[in-house]
Amino acid sequence: MAGERFYLELEPPEERLRHAPHVVIVGGGFAGVRACKALANADVRISLIDKRNFNLFQPLLYQVATGLVSRGDVATPLRQLVGRQRNVQVLLGEVTQINPEGKQIVFNGKGYGYDYLVLATGSGSTFFGHEHWRTFAPPMKILEHAEEIRRRLLMAMEQAEQTPDPEARRFLQTVVIVGGGPTGCEMAGATSELMRNAMRREFRQLNPADTRIILVDPGDRVLRAMPEALSQAAQETLEALGVEMLFKGRVQTMQPGEVTVGTPDGDQRLQAATVIWTAGVRPSHLGKKLADAIGCETDRSGRVIVEPDFSVQGHPEIRVVGDLCSYKHTKDGNPLPGMAGPATQAGGFVGKDIAAMVGGQSRPTFSWFDFGSMAVLDRVDAVADLRGFKFKGGIGWLLWAAAHLAFMPDRENRYTLLIKWIFAVVSQSRASMLLTGMPSQHMGLDAPDAAFPMQPGSGPSIAEPGAALRAAMDYYSNQVSGLPTQSESGDSAAAIK
């Protein structure tokens, strides 16, 4: 086992907690935070570990990506959420190994003991074996992803504003979104609102009618997990917003400025300055580390198969919750969906169950309450399937807004989100249109371009567009307009004239 065993002792206000059972919760998302809060009154000491020092409200990342809200509206410091609990210590770092036999994890390179371990590290994005596409089409799972997407969208619009060639402007105003699930549909609707309405007054040269937003999905309809009637209503709303649908389409190849999509009618080449990926989800890599350590079962996607109490077979002290687990002990035998509601309920149950075990009380039984699913499509339009009751339009939007505000863990963010949503509905404007993540503004100083999470650029000067947009414009010059590239011409403006 790499690393020495040591304990980061709490300095609790109550001395009795120093030798209390140690609960380590890995992951500060919906499930981890709720588990932590459920243990607030238990005689345990808790270490909440996360690679970030904040809780991220992932369902609203698309609003960060399209400038409707800012990062502070969807991210809350973990210490602000649970740090005032007398039995909690929040630790920043990454768990790299698990040793169930020794009841240890390796955290920041050192061994760290536990009595109970809760793994709630969520999920990430997958490109189905084509990880090099990540540079061309950023996903949307973390805050930096959303801000990179916003940067690319705004950079394309800024570039189009100073481009005299109308064909080049149309290329810059074209966006391809891969994936027709809730995230893809929400992103398509918000992008259309951004590029057709929000920019109407700010960009003098751009024609909103030249904007193209293409939604690609391998199925035959959007929102396939919802009833067909709501799926059809969502499609009609998006099409009314100008979103083009490309069904039964699978991405074959990708390069800067172009996506090749295979369809039953043959391959289609989509030329776009901006591509966004919302198609694939994979569980956290910690699930594989656990499976390798104890030989537990995983499903086809890599999620850990758990017992009715979310424990791992043979290890009742280890619980796996949220998107990292495959929980099939439901009434219909279908796994819990990877959404905020199930994750929150699972985290709360595990916290209460551990508290009952420590306190010698009767243990609870997990029962999932399915609230349903929903997706917002426009400023005041959404679809919702709430336990068989179907809503769309304005009523759907009100229900969507109420549900998201209820799940938001921080009270202050609830108020700011409500104000910004009302402002967006009334003014058709965006509150967070800052263009950040650019190279250094200092003259003569090279700096990496968007070094994380995208592949770093070579440090272009501020006079040039960002690395991703520059690559797309090089493609446009070579493959579409036939004009020389920037490197061939030596003039940064030549590629767009």
Image (cartoon, rainbow, N blue to C red):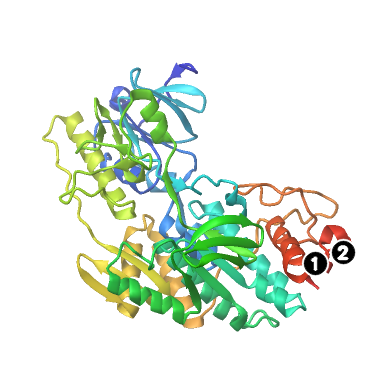
- Residue at horizontal 36 percent and vertical 54 percent from the top: 409
Residue wearing tag 1: 495
Measuring from the top left, give residue 143's x and y in whole percent: 52, 53
Q: In which quarter of the image is the C terminus?
A: bottom right
Depth check, front residue: 236 or 388: 236
Say whether residue 421 is visible. yes
Q: What's under tag 2, amino acid-wise?
A: Asp
- When asked about the image quadrant of residue 402, the answer is bottom left
- Residue 491 tag number: 2
209 left or right, relative to 374: right
Where does the image place residue 163, in percent across and percent down from the top left? 76, 75
Find residue 478 and name its label: none
Q: In this view, does 241 lie above or below 120?
A: below
The residue lying at 24 percent from left, 73 percent from top is: 390
Farthest residue, direction left: 362
Residue type for callout 1: Ala
Considering every residue shown, the one lying at the far right of the view is: 490
- Whether 275 is drawn above or below 359: the answer is below
Q: Badge 2 local density, few (<14 within 10 Å), some, or many (20+)?
A: few
